Every structure is written in C-alpha cells, then in structure tokens.
Amino acid sequence: MIRFCKKLCLVLIFAALAASALVLWQSPDPEYQLQSWLATGRFSSYDALIADAARKHGLDPLLVKAMVWRESAFDPSKVGTSGERGLMQVGEAAAQDWAAAEKIEDFAPTDLFDAKTNLEVGTWYLKKALERWKQKDNAVPFALAEYNAGHARVERWITATERGDEARAENLMRVIDFPTTRKYIEDITARQRFYQAAAER
C-alpha cells in the first residue's frame, strides 16, 4: 500500500509538471507566466485598485498594469535608485505636485508605499502627460517617455526629430538617445498588448 501511494504521488507530480510545461509552452510569454507563478498571486493582487485608479483618470487599466509590472513587478515596497517609491515608482516631486493639486496638506513621501495612494498619484501624473501629448498620432509613447525621463527630455527629442509639432510616435522612438527609455516604452506597450490579448481569450 505504501509503495502504491509513493507511485501514485510520483505520477501526480509528473502529471502536474507536464501540465505546467504545457501551459508554459502555449503561453505567448512563458517567462512572464513563470514569474507570475513564483510571485504567488502578487501579479494580480492589485488589479482592482489599478482598475479603480485608471477609471478615475480615464486610463486603460491594462496600460497602468503594464506600467506597474515594468516599474516595480507589483512590489509596493520597492524603492528606486533615485528614491522613487512603490508600485508605479513615483518620485517625491511628482507626488508633491499631486498633493498640492489635490489640496492634501498632510501628505508624506512614505504615503507612496500605500498601494492605493501610489496608484492615485501615478495615474494622475500619467493622465497629465497623456493630456499634454493628446494631439499626437499616439500619445502613449510620448507620455511614457515623459514619465520615465521627464518633460524636458521629451521636448529635446521632439526637436531632434526636426519635425516640430508634426513629430509622430515613430519619429520620437527613433531619436530617443536613452536606450533604457526606449526599452521602457517598448516593454510597457508590449505588455499592454499581452494583457489585452489575455483578456480577449
């Protein structure tokens, strides 16, 4: 009986491994799938808060989720190399702008470790950037470049396109001279498409 139970356990383990391998093989992004399993639910635990913050500012929640994935891998306690905090890696200056605009007098930078507050500030900032570039053919790359590298650098890159107000997203992507910013935009837009495809399945 003990021998039978051991064999049965081995068969079940093998079946589970085979099923996992099949899921990974069929996944459009096996690495992400594996990371989400290892994160034990963290990759989806903020979906409701993300959706609420995105809806409040008229944003695509899948774009916001893609940013959270890229910025912090869904870790609300993450601190960036320049002091950015939380899920959307919000900097203190942006957070102070938000607090002033919202008339929040008791805001402290440590509040950015609260997932709801961080998402509120991050989506507010992203919405402002998208509004600034709404006349472009695709505002998202411009807004993401601003979120990652700052407004002044985006203006410099637009100047480098030599197209002025006619600069399109593809022109911007060609002249960005920060490889990390270009990769940042590519990663987020690809992840947004991944989430959209998953939602349609």
Image: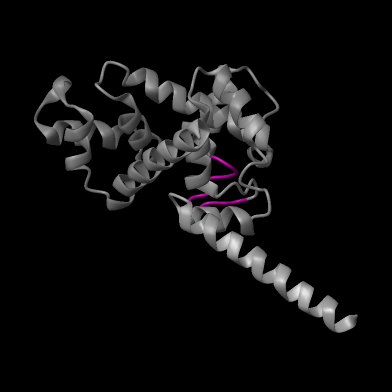
Q: Position of residue 178 (x, y in %)?
A: 27, 49
Q: Quadrant of residue 46?
A: top right
Can residue 8 be seen?
Answer: yes
Say which of 75 and 3 sits in front: 3
Residue name at image x 66 percent, y 42 percent:
113
Tell me which segment is drawn in magenta: 78-89
Residue 84 magenta-drawn? yes
Image quarter of the N terminus: bottom right
Name, please, the residue furthest toward the right: 1
Q: Position of residue 21 (x, y in %)?
A: 54, 63
Q: Quadrant of residue 104?
A: top right
- Residue 29's place in the image compared with 176, above or below, is below
Colour mode of the rendering: one colour
Say which of 10 and 141 sits in front: 10
In the rendered picture of this protein, how many numbered marks are placed on residues?
Answer: 0
Is 178 situated left or right of 199 in this image?
A: left
Say which of 188 and 9 sits in front: 9
- Residue 191's place in the image compared with 26, above or below, is above
Is 190 situated left or right of 152 in this image?
A: right
Residue name at image x 64 percent, y 45 percent:
76
Is 184 situated left or right of 172 in this image?
A: right
Is 160 situated left or right of 14 in this image?
A: left
Residue 104 magenta-drawn? no
Magenta highlight: main SS: loop
Q: Position of residue 36 (x, y in %)?
A: 59, 52
- Residue 103's place in the image compared with 147, above or below, is above
Name, please, the residue furthest toward the bottom: 3
Can residue 91 be seen?
Answer: no
Q: Position of residue 189 (x, y in %)?
A: 37, 38
